[in-house]
Image (tube, rainbow, N blue to C red):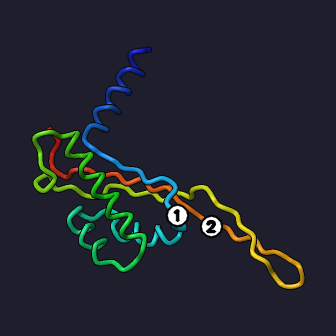
């Protein structure tokens, strides 16, 4: 590997040490419904996001709350000796992508059939600290 590639790889690794992420794959909720909840917590402090998700009445909020807790625990594992409460964590990015689609058929009048698409999604949540990195 050339020195330029090596330097850029080391720089990328150093940037990734400070962030932590969690993924939720094949979640059986439509991506559109999940994005409604994801847009609410994007860019917020972790404590604010957790309270918003806890008291939201959307079904997707329960799954995102569990995912956010997983990302916080991953951050604590990466940064030993630091607590998430003191680190001023925030939701850096949250992406909701379409997952696999289950295709079903529903009978329709006059011998026809309508296709039903049961959608799922993939969610990637990235948590970062606002404090100065040392």
Q: Give coordinates of residue 65: x percent, y percent.
A: 32, 64
Q: Quadrant of the C terminus?
A: top left
Q: Crowding near pointer 1: few (<14 within 10 Å), some, many (20+)? A: some
Q: Residue at x 36, y 68 (%)?
A: 62
Dot 2 lies on which element? Answer: strand
Question: What separation in Å lies between label 1 and label 2 (alpha carbons)?
Answer: 8 Å
Q: Relative to residue 122, is residue 56 drawn left or right?
A: left
Residue 86: image tag? none
Dot 1 lies on which element? Answer: loop
Quarter holding residue 19? top left
Between 122 and 86, the residue placed more toward the observer is: 122
> Which residue is label 1 attached to?
28
Quarter holding residue 17? top left
Between 109 and 8, the residue placed more toward the observer is: 109
Q: Give coordinates of residue 116: x percent, y percent.
A: 70, 71
Between 112 and 70, the residue placed more toward the observer is: 112
Give the mark, 1 or 2, whose residue is nearer the N terminus.
Answer: 1
Q: Give coordinates of residue 69: x percent, y percent.
A: 27, 57
Between 18 and 65, the residue placed more toward the observer is: 65
> Which residue is label 2 attached to?
118
Circle 1/circle 2 CB separation < 8 Å: yes
Q: Residue furthest right?
A: 110
Q: Residue at x 47, y 68 (%)?
A: 34
Q: Residue at x 32, y 31 (%)?
A: 13
């Amino acid at each position: 590997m050339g020195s330029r590639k090596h330097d850029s790889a080391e720089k990328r690794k150093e940037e990734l040490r400070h962030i932590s992420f969690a993924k939720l794959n094949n979640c059986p909720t439509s991506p559109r419904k999940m994005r409604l909840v994801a847009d609410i917590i994007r860019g917020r402090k972790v404590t604010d996001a957790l309270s918003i998700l806890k008291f939201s009445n959307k079904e997707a909020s329960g799954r995102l709350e569990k995912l956010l807790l997983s990302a916080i625990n991953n951050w604590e594992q990466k940064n030993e000796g630091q607590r998430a409460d003191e680190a001023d964590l925030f939701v850096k990015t949250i992406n909701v992508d379409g997952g696999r689609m289950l295709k079903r058929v529903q009978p329709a009048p006059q011998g026809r059939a309508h296709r039903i698409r049961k959608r799922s999604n993939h969610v990637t949540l990235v948590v970062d600290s606002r404090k100065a990195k040392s």
